[in-house]
Image (cartoon, rainbow, N blue to C red):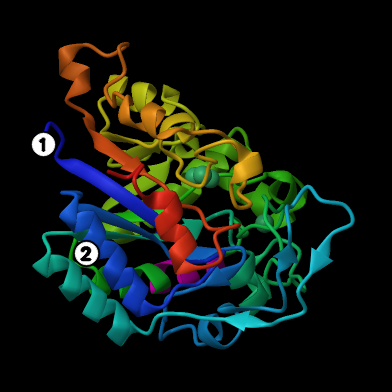
Amino acid sequence: PRFAYRGLHLDVCRHFFPLSFVKKYIDVLAAHKLNTFHWHLTDDQGWRIEIKKFPKLQSVASCRNETLVGHYSDTPERYDGVKECGYYTQKEVKEVVEYARKRFVTIIPEIEMPGHALAALTAYPELGCTGGPYETAKKWGVFDDVFCAGNDETFNFIEGVLDEVCALFPGTYIHVGGDECPKVRWEACPKCQKRMKTEGLKDEHELQSYFVRRAEAVLTKHGKKLIGWDEILEGGIASSATIMSWRGIEGGIAAAKAGHDAIMTPSSDVYLDYYQSDPATEPLAIGGYLTLEKVYSYEPVPAELNAEEAKHILGAQANVWTEYITTSDYVEYMAYPRAC
Ligand code: ACM
Ligand code: ZN
């Protein structure tokens, strides 16, 4: 109750979970007095929300041809040979939004940009710097191919997507990602370089900020506010942005000191995809080591902030990334009891 924002996140891109489970997840988080569900809906490995203006997001981007078996660091890599598809229709999204509302839970949808966009690029390769072809990712990691920031078609796409997303979700906040966006394609892309020149941007970090500001303008038009991962601080923060501090607490501190709101989600303390006990005794996970005791002892307000700055820390959120979490039972095993 110290905090207005008490969140739990779920990645439905790396593995897709049925609507019935999403509702159960909301039931359980509400039972624990969490009030925000961060729904991670788009990523390299799949696009999971119906967007009527762009039908190939359903027919192409919601599928990947097969999936990595075992850990991403294993050699040689092995794949399961099984095509996997899944997305939520807008009708289903509305159903979940209403289900959550009745439980006093607000949903924050996340639409990733400019990185973590391979599934979208596979459907619409003209939105990437090289023009593709691309393939929805079959393994986990950070990929060099991202949305082209020099192509006006990209912003037409982003606007069309966000228009529909804003209409579906009644909450104030829309999350636009912004994390882990390599700049190598932008560095080599004539359109991106031209954009930097005409907009007076001194490097690719400022180009990323330009991208985020274009998204912010769309959200503002709908009366919404933008949230981004802490990387969006790097080229100058968008004026109305709230920061999700995940690479530690520094992003949250910088945001609060600059007068921006922040939500604390440091991987060291609240990444529930990390091992919770001796890895030798646990199912396969991404790595890390985060015990129940450590999560419990997490203090969301950094000691570096004075009382005035600390007001910008809206609260905390735990994140459940599902690269290795293949079933709903496993989601619950990882989320609880640590989410409590
Ligand atoms: C993140 O964990 N890449 C936000
Ligand atoms: Zn480009």
Specify the label residue 27 is tagged with: 2
Tell me if label 1 and label 2 are in contact, CB under 8 Å.
no
Which residue sits furthest right?
76
User: Which residue shows up at 59% across the image and 44% down it?
Assistant: 180
Q: Is residue 195 visible?
A: yes
Q: Main secondary structure of the magenta part?
A: helix
- The image quadrant that residue 27 belongs to is bottom left
Q: Foreground residue, 268 or 4? A: 268
Which residue in the protein does label 1 denote? 1
Q: Is residue 150 left or right of residue 299?
A: right
Q: Secondary structure at mark 2?
A: helix
- Of badges 1 and 2, nearer the viewer stands 2
Q: Residue furthest front?
A: 281
**Magenta highlight range:** 152-160
Q: CA distance from mark 1 to mark 2?
A: 19 Å
Q: Is residue 81 above or below residue 291?
A: below
Q: Amino acid at mark 1?
A: Pro
Q: Is mark 2 within 8 Å of ligand 1?
A: no
Q: Residue at x 18, y 73 (%)?
A: 99
Residue 165 relative to residue 45: left or right = left
